[in-house]
Image (cartoon, helix red, strand yellow):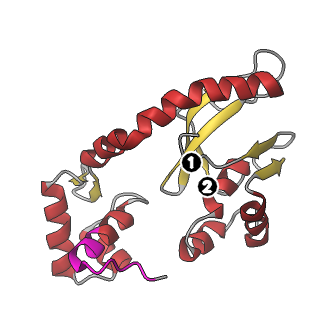
Amino acid sequence: MDNSSGVGVLDKAALVLGALESGPATLAGLVAATGLARPTAHRLAVALEHHRMVARDMQGRFILGPRLAELAAAAGEDRLLATAGPVLTHLRDITGESAQLYRRQGDMRICVAAAERLSGLRDTVPVGSTLTMKAGSSAQILMAWEEPERLHRGLQGARFTATALSGVRRRGWAQSIGEREPGVASVSAPVRGPS
């Protein structure tokens, strides 16, 4: 898949930001992850740092910067969470089961909204919980539409297969029975827009 927009400097900056999505990186780590020449990777990382899209951690490694969170919030992240509450509550009420909303963050998924069961077994995942992308129906949903290279990496050690994810893409939803935790089943679907 060609990721070239025709604007080389933007494509290279996107490579740097993409490399930092999975966590902190040294300059050598950025060079290895992006394939960029060392001076180019350094110049871009420092320029992105100037614009707060990249920052440094306590060890001096490059990390994603605070400006990205500000832009994400402006793009509607808060609207998603505001909309999610009533929808998750309704889903819980009609199914009698807990309901959660997950967002991918690097190689993990984070629970960003939840509606817990009112009675019975409490098997919900609290908001803020970080879970693996290797098991569970929501992990399948978050993996199913990934680009081939990231999908291949993500399947290493996963409790589901590429064939299972192909079925998820075809159906538009995923199920998991005892994949993440024995005796726990789940069903997940992607959230693609306001509706």
Label 2, residues with CA under 10 Å away: few <14, some 14-19, many ≥20? many
Question: Marks 2 and 1, Cα distance to the nearest angstrom?
Answer: 8 Å
Labels in figure, total: 2
Residue named by callout 2? 142
Pinpoint residue 73: horizontal percent, then vertical percent: 35, 39
Q: Is mark 1 on a helix, strand or loop?
A: strand
Q: Is residue 136 visible?
A: no
**Residue shown at 43%/39% (left/top)?**
77
Question: In the rendered structure, which segment of residues is drawn in magenta?
Answer: 2-13
Q: Is residue 112 visible?
A: yes
Pick the residue in front: 10 or 192: 192
**Residue shown at 58%/72% (left/top)?**
153
Pinpoint residue 177: horizontal percent, then vertical percent: 85, 48
Amino acid residing under circle 2: Leu
**Residue shown at 14%/63% (left/top)?**
47
Label 1, residues with CA under 10 Å away: few <14, some 14-19, many ≥20? many
Q: Point out the residue furthest to the top here.
A: 119
User: Residue 109 has which mark?
Assistant: 1
Which of the two discs, 2 and 1, labels the residue nearer the N terminus? 1
Whether label 2 touches label 1, CB < 8 Å:
yes
92 lies left or right of 13:
right
Number of the front mark, 2 or 1: 2
Magenta segment: does it hold 143?
no
Magenta segment: does it hold 10?
yes
Q: In which quarter of the image is the C terminus?
A: top right
Pinpoint residue 119: horizontal percent, then vertical percent: 80, 15
